Every structure is written in C-alpha cells, then in structure tokens.
Image: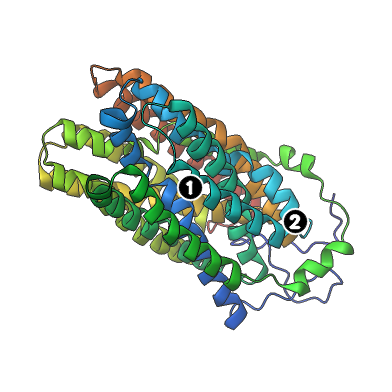
C-alpha cells in the first residue's frame, strides 16, 4: 500500500499528478520533447503493424468462411480471430507487471519477433488445415500481440502527464491506419497472387514497421530508476478500488459485442449484395474513421476527462451495431462503417487512458491497465464464437447483431456508473 509520503493526492483528471512538492519518488516527466514524441511515433508503428493487422481479421473471416476453410463452421473459424484478439488483453497482466519491473525492451523485442515469425508461418499453411491456421494466426500472432500491446502504450506514461490521453490517442491511431492498409492489400493481393504470397507481402510491411517501432520507442530512465527505490506494488489493493473494478466489469461486458462489425461486416455486406468492391473496402472505411475517433476522443479526454466521454461512446457504439441491420446499399454501408469506427475507436482508446488515469502513481499504470485488459480478454475470447454460433450456416444475422448491440449498450451503462462514482469520490465533475 502507498503511504501519504509516497504518493500525492489524486488529480481530478489524470490521477497521477504530483504537483508542488519535492519527493524522492516524484518522477521527471517531460510532457514533450524529441524523446517523448519519438516514442509516440514508435508506439504508432507498433500499433500499425500488430493491432492494425489484428483489426483486419474480417478479411480473413470472409475468405476463410467462403473459400480457404469452407469445410468449417463460421463459429469455429471465429475462434482464430477471437483468440488472437484476446491474447493482447489476456497477457496484459503479465506484460504489464513485467513492464512495471523495468523489462520494457525485452517485451517489445520478443513480441515483435514472435509476431513476425508467426505471420510468415501463416503464409505456409495448407487449405482446409484448420489447426495450422489456428496455431500460427491465433496462438503465435496472439502471443506476439500480448507481449507488445500494454508495454507499447504504457511507455507513454513515462513521457507524458498533462497530454497523456492525446499521446495515447495518437499512438492508437496507428492500429486504425494499419487496419485500413492491410485489408486493402489482402483483398487485392489474394485474388492476384494467391493466399501465401499475399500474406508474405503484408508480413514484410509488418517487419519494417516493427523494426522502426523498436528503434523509436525509448523509456525514461528518470522514472524507471525509481522502481528500485519504490516498494512493491500491492496489486490486490486494485480489487478494493470500487470505481476501478466496476470499470473493469464494463470493459468485460463491452468486449463481448463491440468487435462484431470488425469480424463480420464485410461478410454481411457481401451476403446482402451491397457490391463486392465496396464491401471489400468496408473494413478500411471503418478503421479510417476509428483513427479520427481515437485521436479526437483522447484530445477531448484531456479537456473533459476520459470517464465523461466513455459512457456516451459505449452507448453510441451499441447503437451503430444495431444499425448494421439497415445496411442494404453502398451509402448505408459507408455511413454505418464511418459512425461505428468513430465511436468504437474513441471508446477503445478512452478505456486505456481511463484505466491509467485511475492509477495512484505512474508505477501502477501498467499493472492497472494490464489487469483490466486481462479480465476483458474473456469477452474478446468468447465474442466471435458466440456470434458465429448465433449466425449459423443459414446466416441468421438478426441474432448475433441483437446480442452484440444490447451487450455493448449495457457496457455503456456500466461505464456511466463508474463515472458517477468517480465524480463523487473526487468531488469534481471532470473525471
């Protein structure tokens, strides 16, 4: 547990400010400068290459369902993407703890190597060999993501304080841009070059970005050196932090439904005759919009507080999932893709900033974010298979859409409860 001599009172916005007093544990956080912004750039490349590739799984889901793994049920195929999506969250507790112990560089290098190797292995799998795809794309790439995701975002805490949410939003926008580029590449290259060559082409792009990311990201020794002086983190104390735990429950609930369009929108559009050319661009449009949501949401979070914005973003994301049922033309597909991308993109980046804001010191940011994402990983793991089982081979779209829309709206309501408790606890409406 922290004592009053170790930790300053919580800031109403960031929860990690240490104003006005010299303390042996007061970190030197520059809140800008060449090293800080190069770290943002490195984190952007990391998100582009890893989480951006993950958010392109809708292309694989469509291709696997209709051709490459067509002997398997949609729900079984969805386990590949859901495991890949769950791993960065499930391993967040481990990677967050190792990050807090000072092992940032080992984590991002190891994760980058595993992710790249697994992607090249994916290019060697055989058609209809489900287990090969599952091991390379689900397990291997998922582990690589799990080792890099939390450290690549938590390192920003070492460089930013006042503009921390904006820095996180800029970094997370890399995943949105990656999820624009990779679906376009895959949709164009698979018909022309075949599956193996198309995957290898994207793998070389990933390798280049990961090399750049590892070269640009730097830790802040002034903060890291304090870890040797500081007492061990009391992770169990997080479990008695009521607003934090309710917020964690909110992200668990939300993740059961919020990625439904990422996995299934392209397949839905193709099946409803919207036009294969525009359907192939639906994920790119969705993820381009999410880049604006992530930057804009976190820019506003620095001004109004992340927990004031999280509840409306959750509710609007749920509403846009319901709106998928209204997609029957090119214009409706584009509109739903843009609006869903804006609100869901803002929601994801706000959740990362929000859990960091609940930390009582910068030392806790990695562990708190990692614990929240680890619990939320169960939602990621179960979401796509449940949606696929509800969809069935007869493609009954109302059932998975209704399930996903309702559960994401419930998550938004839970975030609202978190926001109200925080406002009462801190005595301010800016939370």
* Label 2, label 1: how far apart the Cα atoms are: 28 Å
Q: Residue at x 33, y 50 (%)?
A: 198
Q: Residue at x 12, y 36 (%)?
A: 328
Q: Residue at x 35, y 61 (%)?
A: 292
Asked if residue 68 lies left or right of residue 153, the reply is left
Query: Label 1, on which residue?
Result: 119
Task: State which mark lies toward you, 2 or 1.
Answer: 1
Asked if residue 136 lies left or right of residue 320, the reply is right
Q: Estimate how packed mark 1 is, as few (under 14), some (14 to 19) or many (20 or more) residues with alpha carbons within 10 Å.
A: many
Q: Quadrant of residue 315?
A: top left
Q: Residue at x 43, y 27 (%)?
A: 130
Residue 356 appears in the figure: yes
In the depicted structure, whether residue 415 falls above or below residue 129: below
Q: Estimate how packed mark 2 is, as few (under 14), some (14 to 19) or many (20 or more) residues with alpha carbons within 10 Å.
A: many
Q: Earlier in the sequence, mark 2 or mark 1?
A: 2
Asked if residue 231 lies left or right of residue 102, the reply is right
Q: Quadrant of residue 128?
A: top left
How many numbered callouts? 2
Query: Label 2, on which residue?
Result: 100
């Amino acid at each position: 547990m922290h004592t009053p001599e170790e930790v300053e009172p919580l800031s109403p916005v960031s929860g990690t400010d240490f104003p006005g007093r010299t303390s042996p544990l007061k970190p030197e956080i520059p809140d800008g400068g060449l090293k800080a912004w190069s770290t943002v750039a490195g984190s952007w490349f990391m998100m582009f290459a890893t989480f951006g590739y993950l958010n392109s799984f809708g292309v694989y889901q469509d291709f696997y369902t209709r051709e490459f793994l067509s002997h398997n049920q949609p729900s079984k195929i969805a386990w590949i993407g859901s495991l890949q999506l769950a791993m960065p969250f499930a391993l967040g507790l481990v990677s967050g703890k190792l990050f807090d112990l000072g092992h940032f560089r080992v984590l991002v290098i190891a994760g980058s190597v595993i992710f790249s190797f697994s992607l090249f292995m994916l290019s060697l799998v055989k058609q209809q060999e489900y287990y090969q795809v599952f091991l390379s794309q689900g397990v291997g790439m998922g582990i690589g993501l799990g080792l890099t995701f939390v450290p690549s975002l938590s390192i920003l805490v070492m460089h930013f304080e006042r503009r921390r949410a904006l820095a996180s939003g800029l970094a997370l926008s890399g995943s949105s841009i990656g999820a624009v580029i990779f679906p376009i590449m895959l949709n164009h290259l698979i018909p022309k070059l075949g599956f193996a060559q198309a995957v290898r082409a994207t793998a070389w792009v990933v390798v280049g970005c990961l090399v750049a990311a590892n070269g640009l990201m730097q830790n802040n020794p002034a903060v890291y050196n304090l870890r040797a002086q500081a007492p061990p983190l009391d992770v169990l104390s997080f479990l008695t932090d009521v607003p934090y735990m309710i917020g964690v429950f909110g992200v668990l609930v939300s993740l059961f439904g919020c990625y439904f369009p990422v996995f299934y929108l392209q397949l839905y559009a193709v099946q409803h005759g919207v036009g294969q050319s525009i359907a192939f661009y639906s994920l790119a449009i969705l993820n381009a919009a999410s880049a604006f949501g992530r930057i804009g949401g976190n820019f506003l979070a620095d001004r109004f507080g992340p927990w004031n914005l999280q509840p409306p973003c959750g509710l609007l994301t749920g509403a846009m999932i319901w709106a998928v049922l209204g997609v029957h033309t090119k214009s409706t597909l584009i509109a739903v893709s843009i609006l869903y991308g804006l609100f869901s993109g803002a929601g994801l980046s706000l959740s990362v900033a929000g859990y960091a804001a609940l930390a009582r010191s910068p030392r806790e940011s990695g562990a708190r974010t990692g614990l929240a994402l680890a619990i939320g990983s169960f939602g990621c793991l179960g979401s796509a298979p449940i949606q696929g089982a509800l969809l069935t081979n007869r493609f009954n779209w109302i059932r998975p859409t209704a399930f996903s829309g309702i559960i994401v709206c419930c998550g938004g309501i839970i975030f609202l409860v978190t926001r109200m408790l925080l406002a009462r606890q801190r005595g301010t409406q800016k939370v």
